[in-house]
Image: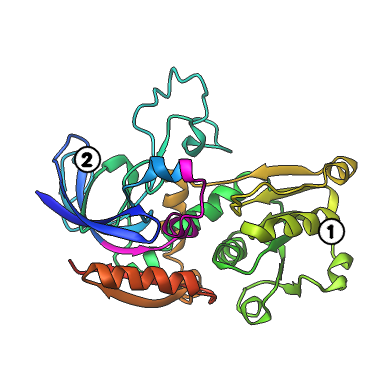
Amino acid sequence: MFSKGYKIVSPKKFEIYVDEIKSLPDYCIVKVDRVAICKADLRYYLGNRDKRVLGLKYPMNLIHEAVGTVVRDMSGKFIAGEKVVLVPNLIMKCDKENCDYQLCNNESLGENYCPDAKFASSNYNSFSSDFVSYPSSNLVKSNPDVEPGVAVFSELISVAFAAIRRVKIQKDMSVGIFGDGILGYILCCVLREIFKVKIIVIGKHEEKLEVFPSDKYYLTDDKMVHNEKFDIIFEAVGGKGAESAVDSIVNIINPGGSIILTGVSEENIRVNTRKILEKGIALYGVTRSSVSDFEQAVKLLENTIFKNRISKLLLSDTEVSNISEFYNVFEKEVRNKKLGKYVIKFEF
């Protein structure tokens, strides 16, 4: 069986590839139904990473946010026709019982931090193709009642779960989210459904902040935010704005508070270590997510209120049948300033 797909070969240059799809033990052949472009995909597309790193990555299938339909299962775990979410974090060579790192069994970290892990669209081919052969252990059954264009947000929801499990959130805490982008919004939605806490969001764009299901929001230059008491703050800014965001968070968080960094920055940022030490702040870094995080994400999407909130992020369900249309969606995402994504439906 053969699969057609698009691989990035250099900045802003895709090529069409036809790869053989093999039926392997414990693997499934999955038809890719919907995918969504991540900021990480845009960094590879624009060439916004170190040239030496990019040289090692190309050519590669991009996109790690995907849902699909099982075509054939050699593991016996799934039935042909079942809807699944594809988990991009792959552990294939790790001997969990004898691993030197012993991270896979650490509930607060998980297999996503194992040095033996691979990640689709980073150091393993991803989902910009019509079919993939993929480990059944990295597939999570999706509710068929959730439309594919919404189910594709399971990856970002899983990242929110990964961030939340790094800290102990207790009833009546005051939790902040710094950043008004998609991940900040999803973090807010997940927290709203699971915890009875006060949620305060800080961001730059009031038209976005108004949509968040938070108790209160502030613009980043509003001095009144210093009157709030924050026990935990999630940083969801990343990029060039991460430095000023982290500095602001350090200033407003309670002594003994916890900061969870979820935004990715390609450049080094300065951090006020003196104030972190003086206030006894705990600093956590979170990236990617595990299979169990995806399972929780899929389960939460069965909640009608939560699903409706996530559906607001679907800007359009765009059919892509050729490489020109694939370029067009990437360019739309490069320019996209809205709270949402242009989801792709492949029609090869």
Scheme of image coloration: rainbow
Quadrant in the picture for the C terminus: bottom left
Total label count? Answer: 2
Does dot 1 land on a helix, a strand or a loop? helix
Q: In the rendered image of this protein, does residue 172 appear above or below residue 310?
A: above
Give neighbour class at mark 2: few <14, some 14-19, many 20+ (Cα, 10 Å): many
The image position of residue 69, as x and y in percent, is 22, 58
Which residue is at 45% across, 70% downward?
333
Side of 72 where 109 appears, left or right: right
Q: In the rendered image, which residue does mark 1 sit on?
A: 252
Looking at the image, is 293 positioned above or below residue 117?
A: below
- The residue at the far bottom in this view is 207
The vertical placement of 172 against 50, above or below, is below
Q: Is residue 41 magenta?
A: yes
Residue position for label 2: 27
Horizontal side of residue 114 vs 235, given as left or right? left
The answer to whether 290 appears left or right of 255 in the picture is left
Q: Is residue 61 magenta?
A: no
- Mark 2 and mark 1 in contact (Cβ < 8 Å)? no
Q: CA distance from mark 1 to mark 2?
A: 48 Å
Q: Quadrant of residue 122?
A: top left
Mark closest to the chain's N terminus, 1 or 2: 2
Q: Which residues are magenta?
A: 33-52
Residue type, label 1: Ile
Along the line of sight, which residue is nearer the eye, 8 or 77? 8
Q: Amino acid at mark 2?
A: Tyr
Q: Residues within 10 Å of mark 1 (few under 14, many from 20)?
A: some
